[in-house]
Amino acid sequence: MDWKWIDPQMAEQGISLLRRLIEQGYEGYFVGGCVRDELMGRPVNDMDIATNATPEQVMNIFEHTIPTGIAHGTITVIMNGEQFEVTTYRTESDYTDHRRPEQVQFVSDLYEDLRRRDFTMNAIARGIDGSYVDPFHGREDLEQGIIRCVGDPEERFEEDALRMLRGIRFSSVFDFTIEPATWQALVHRRSLIRYIAAERIRVEMEKMIAGLYPFKGIRLLQESELVPDMKINVPCPPEQPELLMRLADIPADPAVLRWTLIVMAMGLDSERMKPYMKEWTFSNAFMDQVSRLLRMNERLLTAAGTDAEESLFEVYISAVIHYGRETALQWQQLYPVLMDNEQQQLAIFAEHGKQWLDEMNIFSLSDVEINGQELLAALQAKGGPWLGKLMNEILLATAAGQLDNTREAILDYARKQYEKRDH
């Protein structure tokens, strides 16, 4: 059995797992995303397995197991350090809040298990001999680039409303077309998305925005009218929609780049974006990254009106110190997709910023060769607000290359500045 798009070690252990199930008298198949991605020539990151063995039987067969989702038939099996989710064939019914099945019944028929899945491309199984079980023609839909629900799309979306957003995400990431009946059912059932938690929506959105065709996903979201019923507040329509069309023109990694551009498209600044991103359940750390990038751009725009290159140089160095080297590098990547008028205003920073950044030797007070307490001792002075101001002046001067980062040079500079101040 040949797997081309997965780590050979994982494939080897996965095949060993299937072989063990079969030797014990059970069935075992690779299912879902790993089969789909292998057929598409996309990297396979994990391998899910379906079997007619019950969870208890799976745990008896394998030495290292974790009952991660035993109520729903899923056991994590560890084979030589590789983890595999092994799930018993099952049917689902009585969905709670259009999301979670209330009733899960284990079955012995692979067809029944595949029939409960969302889209035909995810309802393909692959046996240990490399053969496929594809009762819903998922391979044909993959070849034609079609997203199609398994069975009745109205029922699939009624069961789990998140599938509507997943369908749009798959269409966006793979550049596939949503089959007309599936799209019609999605639009018809769009109000059910209100049952889906914000964090689940965010996860799908993050995957969509990180894909090759993020604007396609945004356009489909607008056309489906899912957004008004989501448990999140989205400023719509965007203030600068053309920025959304430029999402694919910047890297998906780090994610802060595309999400900062989305925030800009919505017309939100570094302060007003926080309640929105909090509602979307983004982490404080990620919101801080977006905020830093926005504030750096805002600071550079404010300074761009002056003609003095030396002044702009100091503004840039100060911004790097304040917001960090990583943010400055991210800003260089963000610049080419900003609004054209902003690019014109910020051109000098884009032209010289990388060179200025490369010439910086220090980026924070901890990099300065002498600290505040040592300075006070050398000057035989008492502390106060003046000390913090002086240390920041020293940091800026050394970072800009105007002052050597040595104890002698810094002390000499500090003495002169101390003598100037009013005692």
Image (tube, rainbow, N blue to C red):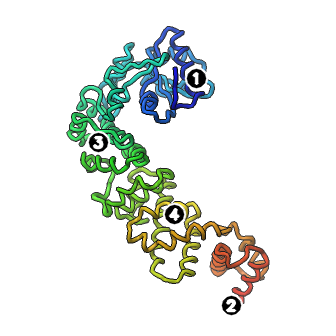
User: Which of pointers 2 and 4 lies earlier in the amino acid sequence?
Assistant: 4
Q: CA distance from mark 2 to mark 1?
A: 73 Å
Q: Residue 375: image x %, image y %?
A: 75, 77
Three-letter amino acid code at the position of disc 3: Ile
Q: Residue 392: image x %, image y %?
A: 63, 76
* Residue carrying label 4: 332
- The residue lying toward the viewer, choosing from 153 and 158, is 153
Count residues near mark 1 (Cα–Cα under 10 Å), then give few for <14, some for 14-19, many for 20+: some
The answer to whether residue 339 is seen in the rendering is yes
Count residues near mark 2 (Cα–Cα under 10 Å), then give few for <14, some for 14-19, many for 20+: few
* Residue carrying label 1: 13
Asked whether the beta carbons under mark 3 and mark 1 sit within 8 Å of each other, the answer is no
The answer to whether residue 101 is seen in the rendering is no
Count residues near mark 4 (Cα–Cα under 10 Å), then give few for <14, some for 14-19, many for 20+: some
For discs 3 and 1, the disc positioned in front in the rendered view:
1
Asked whether the beta carbons under mark 2 and mark 1 sit within 8 Å of each other, the answer is no
For discs 1 and 4, the disc positioned in front in the rendered view:
4
Asked whether the beta carbons under mark 2 and mark 4 sit within 8 Å of each other, the answer is no
- Dot label at residue 420: 2
* Quadrant location, the C terminus: bottom right
Q: Quadrant of residue 177?
A: top left
User: Which of pointers 3 and 1 lies earlier in the amino acid sequence?
Assistant: 1
Q: Which residue is at a point 52% across and 14% down the rendered structure image? A: 21
Q: CA distance from mark 4 to mark 3?
A: 37 Å
* Residue carrying label 3: 193
Q: Is residue 38 left or right of residue 398?
A: left
